[in-house]
Structure formats: C-alpha cells, structure tokens
Amino acid sequence: MSNGKWINNFQLKNQIAFNYGVQILKDNQPSWAAGAGLTYNYDGQQYPTTFTRMEYEDYIINAQVKKWFNMNNSNLSLGFNTALKFVGDNLLRHQENPSFTNFVSRNILNPNFAYQNTNYWANQLEVQYTLPAFKKTNAQLYFKTNYQNISSTETMLDSAKGLSNNYFNFTIGLIN
C-alpha cells in the first residue's frame, strides 16, 4: 500500500502437504493401495480496481484405498477417497468505491468468499477396467468412471448449509 491506495494486483498461494501411502503387490502386480494425507492451503488476493483484499486458509485431511482385481492380462480396480476440509483464518476487506457497486459485492465477491470458506466432506468412488495390451503396440485401452459427492458441513451462507454437489465422470483412454 502506498498513500492509502493499493498500487498493484497480487495473488499469493502457498500449499504444504504431507502424504503417506503403501502398495501391496501380488505376483508382481498391484493388489492393494492405501494412503492418507494432510494439506495446508493459503490464498491471498488483492485487487486495486475494486479496493478488495481476500485471504483464507484451510486444512484438508484425506484418505484413500484402492483394490485391483487382475484377470487374464486385464484388470478391474475399485477405489474410494474421502476428504474433510476445515477452514482456518480468513479476511475479506473492501472499501466502497463508485466503480465497486453493491451488485458486485452481493453477487460476486461475497458468494465467492463464502464458497472458499466452506467446510466440507467429500467422498469419491472410482471404477476402472483395463483391457489386455494390444499385441503390436503394447498399448492398453481402459474405461474409467467415478462419482463424487461434496457436502458442506458449515458455511458462511445460511442458505448453503447442508447443500452438496455431485459429479459423475466417464473416461475412455489409452495407456501406452
């Protein structure tokens, strides 16, 4: 800041993660995998045109497990991931300015800040089937699908408490 006015945009992101995982092999092929982790995130943003500053931090605890079923050069894998996000300190500051209207504050800035500062519990289920390798190229075709549910456990917006997002993905890919 200079003379009470912000002179530059900035965005600062920091992340520190600790993860641990193990994998069990059977006949030189993956059979089981499991892991857990803890992640710390910090995000700070400053915008001089709207005289806005946002800062927030969160902690995410996660765990995952995956099982492979090997069958005649093809395999099926099932995975489950879960994560809990806890919001730490946060800051939202903006000064009223003729170019910064209540519409921007009400419909963009405040909902975005509330979303970033929402505690949640996320669960994901994943299934992948990989076909045997092609003889000439040794490439493998796979089909993968996953379903994820993210449920807010606590939020700054009363209207969003208990809401959840559901995601479904389907992928066809080639492993070379």
Image (cartoon, helix red, strand yellow):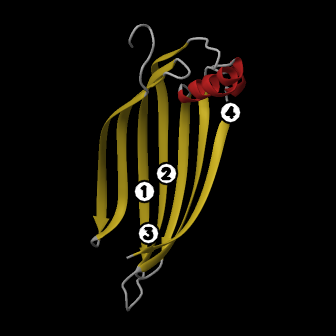
- First reached walking from the N terminus: tag 1 or tag 2: 1
Look at label 2 and name its amino acid: Phe
The answer to the question of whether label 4 and label 1 lie on touching residues, with beta carbons closer than 8 A, is no
Measured from the top left, where is residue 139 in percent x and y? 40, 81
Give the structural element (helix, strand or loop) at label 2: strand
Which residue is at the front of the view, 157 or 131? 157
Task: Indicate the quadrant containing the C terminus: top left, top right, bottom left or bottom right.
Answer: bottom left
The mark closer to the camera, 2 or 3, is 2
User: Image quadrant of residue 44?
Assistant: top left
**Left or right for 104, reference 94:** right
Q: Is residue 112 above or below residue 137?
A: above
- First reached walking from the N terminus: tag 2 or tag 4: 2
Give the structural element (helix, strand or loop) at label 1: strand
Look at label 3 and name its amino acid: Phe
**Residue matched to label 3:** 69
Which residue is at the front of the view, 164 or 7? 7
- First reached walking from the N terminus: tag 3 or tag 4: 3
Measured from the top left, where is residue 91 in percent x and y? 49, 16
**Residue matched to label 2:** 80
**Residue matched to label 4:** 163
Give the structural element (helix, strand or loop) at label 3: strand
Q: Residue at x 61, y 31 (%)?
A: 152
Measured from the top left, where is residue 4 in percent x and y? 44, 8
- First reached walking from the N terminus: tag 2 or tag 3: 3
**Residue matched to label 1:** 66
- First reached walking from the N terminus: tag 4 or tag 1: 1
The answer to the question of whether label 2 and label 4 lie on touching residues, with beta carbons closer than 8 A, is no
Question: Residue extending furthest top?
Answer: 3
User: Image quadrant of residue 123?
Assistant: top right
